[in-house]
Amino acid sequence: MFDSVDRVVIELGNQGYVCDQRIATVVFLAQKLGKPVLIEGPAGVGKTELAKVVATALDRKLIRLQCYEGLDEAKSLYEWEYSKQLLYTQLLKDHVSEAMAGAKNLAEAADRVAAQESVFFSERFIVARPLMQAITSEVPVLLLIDEVDKSDPEFEAFLLEILSDFQVTVPELGTIKAVQIPLVMLTSNDARELSDALKRRCLHLWIDYPSEELELRILDQKVPEIDKRLAQDLVSLMHKIRNLDLKKVPSISETLDWARALLALNASELDEKMVTDTLNVILKYEGDINKTQKALSKLLSEKAAKAAGSDAQTVESPAPASPQKKGVLH
């Protein structure tokens, strides 16, 4: 259990997750109040990762439900194990015959079969899916309902009982309440508007692209071997790229991929050629790459013009004793 917001920051930091006070406060309150957390934001900013590190920090098992269009109750909650039911029926054939013995007509035989339904529709024959696993777990777990915005609105409505009362209803068995209240985190890439009913049951957390300072800290945590100057150039350029009108804006995970790619190429600085050769690491559409290359060329032209003007002004001035080498962005 986290005993303070500061402890959340420390414990998540120990798991390699750099978070600010705002994120830590929501995580602390979710645990303290027993409320689900709806985490929204662009793809790749660390929403799923947050759930993973919180589970590790709290020493809880992570149960993950990946949402998609068409996800239904059978795939998320439970389904009956029909093959096992059939096997039991074969093994118990003699006892079934005894139960049917003496039936005067088909209707009476059907009634006798119906009286035994509870034997075959019991927990013995249920295959528990993620939601059922979280509800029936004997130990506290963290339930991650990932990318809930990809599910259908009907499934979103189905989740309300779990999010508000931590219970599920199985028609043949009745209502099953949580043995241990799970810590629930839902993520959404904001692909569609979620219902007010779902939002009302959750604490809300929006995670946006990090500031340059925070992204540098993340890069230092995840890729500590990268040169500090190169890391600054990389993060600075990444923020410029994110301001472009792209189809797929690069995320934090792509920043880390880019840093590791530069290390693999033994790059010591981000020059124009290196950026051009490695843009496909962070951009996933050819149109985005072309647009970024044009923006980069324009940036370099402006830089060259600025440098030429600066040189003209400093003809009569002494040059700096030891000018610092700067990357393509400066």
Image: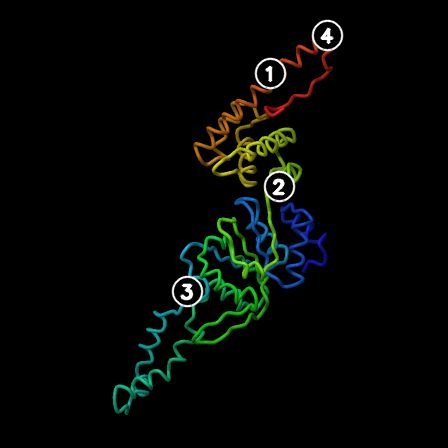
**Which numbered mark, 2 or 1, is in the foreground of this view?**
1
The residue type indicated by label 3 comes to Ala
Residue 257 lies, in percent from the top left, at 53, 37
Left or right, 119 with reference to 162: left
CA gap, disc 1 and disc 3: 64 Å
User: Which of pointers 3 and 2 lies earlier in the amino acid sequence?
Assistant: 3
Query: How packed is label 1: few (under 14 Cα within 10 Å), some, or many (20 or more)?
Result: few
Name which residue lies at 63% across and 49% down: 15
Say which label, 4 or 1, has the lower sequence index. Answer: 1
Mark nearer the N terminus (1 vs 3): 3
Q: Secondary structure at mark 2?
A: loop
Residue type at mark 1 is Ala
Residue 239, image x, y percentages? 59, 34
Local secondary structure at mark 3? helix
Residue 246 placed where, x, y %?
A: 49, 35
- Going from the N terminus, do you reach mark 3 or mark 4 first? 3
Type of amino acid under label 4 = Glu
Label 3 to label 2: alpha-carbon separation: 38 Å
Disc 2 packing (10 Å; few <14; some 14–19; many ≥20): some
- The residue indicated by pointer 1 is 305
Give the crowd class for mark 3: few <14, some 14-19, many >=20 residues within 10 Å: few
Q: Quadrant of the N terminus?
A: bottom right
Nearest to viewer (mark 3 / mark 4): 4
Q: Residue 316 — which label?
A: 4
Return the residue nearer the eye: 92 or 173: 173
Check residue 74 in the rendering and tell me which mark sits there, or answer none: 3
Which one is earlier in the sequence, the residue at label 2 or at label 4? Answer: 2
Q: Spatial distance from mark 3 to mark 4, Cα to Cα?
A: 79 Å
